[in-house]
């Protein structure tokens, strides 16, 4: 279970003997999907130490975001973190792994090697100049290597992208890829403080409060009021 | 020092061997046709016993028209190291294989063949080890070019 940083927008109506929650199916599916990403155990270079090992360990702890179930089989994974350079020999294998991943599948490219070839862009006989030549990438996380916090920032960006998607009506549509650089001057202490504050504040999920901001929820409420006052 | 003793011993056995002065470890240079004989002695002589081939690699010197082969040996009996170097002509990079002396050399020589194009006489299985079998050229040579490679703009 990850740390769910936002509420499920919806409406809770109290009835004698229980409550009824009204929300969109899309929101529910997206919320579940974005908070239970299963990454693939796949690392090709030094970035993998930072991305999959440092973040997976207890100090930084990927589990806070619900993405700690690293799988050794592509068929059980839906997030591919490309950590490190991809060489020509690896490229067809990576494409095969991507094709076999369960839909919907997401790709985060971390580090300059995975984004553009990085230090191996020039005069290299084997490094592919950017993984997006082979598979589509959703989020780029720049750095050499990016810090674990930067990777988390990228992961949060991906979660946001998933949450904004239309799962039912447009299931296969990918959003445009984004570059997700950690804003300047964000320190580890600051992130810790924010997460702590979020933990304290969001301990209690107040669904009714969150739904108040959604225009469609207002319509539902009006409809219910009209129908129950009769 | 043990390694000093070893160097003197090698020099007395093989007078043509040259000691390398600019080296951070005991190192000798030998002509290519005496390499195999020297290696056998280095491993089997009771006073030397270099029974472990730590690494083998090649260096390209296009300006001097030569490849340099390097063998780093370690003696688990005496606890000393020695670096053996030999030179090959760039146009004809054929060296004797030391697989018969240290079996681990088989893969190390395949690597040197794969990336540098050194050919080893009597190697049991001289194939590429890292690159695809149909790769053309030897990428760690200084004059390697291919159509995918980008030149660094000046
Ligand atoms: S971006 Fe830097 S740290 Fe990451 S794989 Fe490339 S060289 Fe290594």
Image (cartoon, helix red, strand yellow):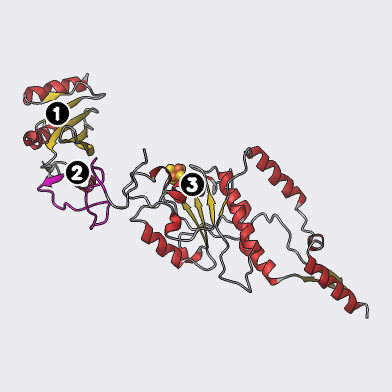
Q: Is residue A25 magenta?
A: no
Q: Is residue B130 magenta?
A: yes
- Crowd class of label 3 (few under 14; some 14 to 19; many from 20; radius 10 Å): many
Give the CA separation, mark 3 to mark 2.
Answer: 36 Å
Give the CA separation, mark 1 to mark 3.
Answer: 43 Å
> In this rendering, which labeled residue sits more in front, label 2 or label 1?
1
Where does the image place residue B39, in percent across and percent down from the top left? Answer: 12, 35
Q: Which mark is on residue B1?
A: none
Where does the image place residue A157, in percent across and percent down from the top left? Answer: 61, 54
Q: Disc 3 on helix, strand or loop?
A: helix
Instruction: Check disc 3 and report the residue beneath it.
Output: A111
Instruction: Check disc 2 and report the residue beneath it.
Output: B105
Name which quarter of the figure residue A26 lies in: bottom right
Where does the image place residue A222, in percent across and percent down from the top left? Answer: 86, 72
Rendering quadrant holding ligand 1: top left
Q: Chain of mark 1?
A: B
Q: Are marks 1 and 3 in contact (CB under 8 Å)?
A: no
Instruction: Check disc 1 and report the residue beneath it.
Output: B29
Compared to B139, does A207 lie above or below?
below
Is disc 2 on the same chain as disc 3? Answer: no
Range of magenta residues? B118-145
Q: Is residue B150 left or right of residue B115?
A: right
Q: Disc 1 on helix, strand or loop?
A: strand
């Amino acid at each position: 279970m990850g740390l769910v940083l936002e509420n499920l927008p919806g409406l809770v109506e109290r009835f004698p003997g229980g409550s009824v929650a009204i929300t969109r199916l899309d929101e529910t599916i997206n919320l579940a999907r974005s908070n239970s990403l299963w990454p693939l155990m796949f690392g090709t270079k030094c970035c993998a130490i930072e991305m999959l090992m440092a973040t997976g360990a207890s100090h930084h702890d990927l589990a806070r975001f619900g993405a700690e179930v690293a799988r050794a089989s592509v068929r059980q994974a839906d997030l591919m973190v490309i950590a490190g350079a991809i060489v020509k020999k690896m490229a067809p294998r990576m494409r095969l792994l991507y094709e076999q991943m369960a839909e919907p599948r997401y790709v985060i490219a971390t580090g300059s090697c995975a984004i553009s070839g990085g230090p191996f862009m020039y005069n290299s006989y084997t490094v592919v100049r950017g993984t997006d030549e082979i598979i589509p990438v959703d989020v780029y996380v720049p750095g050499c290597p990016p810090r674990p916090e930067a990777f988390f920032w990228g992961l949060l960006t991906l979660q946001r992208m998933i949450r904004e998607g239309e799962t039912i009506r447009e299931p296969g549509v990918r959003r445009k890829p984004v570059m997700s650089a950690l804003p300047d001057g964000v320190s580890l202490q600051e992130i810790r403080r924010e997460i702590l504050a979020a933990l304290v504040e969001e301990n209690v999920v107040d669904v009714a409060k969150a739904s108040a901001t959604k225009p469609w929820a207002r319509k539902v409420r009006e409809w219910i009021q009209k129908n129950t006052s009769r | 020092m043990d390694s000093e003793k070893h160097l003197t011993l090698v020099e007395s056995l093989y007078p043509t061997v040259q000691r390398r002065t600019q080296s951070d470890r005991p190192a000798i240079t030998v002509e290519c046709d005496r390499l195999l004989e020297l290696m056998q002695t280095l491993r089997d002589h009771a006073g030397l016993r270099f029974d472990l081939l730590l690494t083998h690699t090649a260096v390209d010197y296009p300006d001097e028209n030569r490849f340099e082969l390097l063998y780093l040996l370690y003696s688990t009996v005496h606890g000393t190291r020695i670096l053996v170097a030999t030179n090959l002509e760039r146009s004809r990079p054929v060296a004797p294989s030391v697989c018969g002396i240290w079996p681990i050399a088989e893969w190390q020589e395949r690597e040197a063949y794969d990336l540098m194009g050194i050919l080893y006489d009597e190697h049991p299985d001289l194939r590429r080890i890292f690159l695809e079998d149909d790769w053309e050229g030897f990428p760690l040579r200084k004059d390697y070019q291919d159509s995918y490679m980008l030149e660094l703009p000046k």
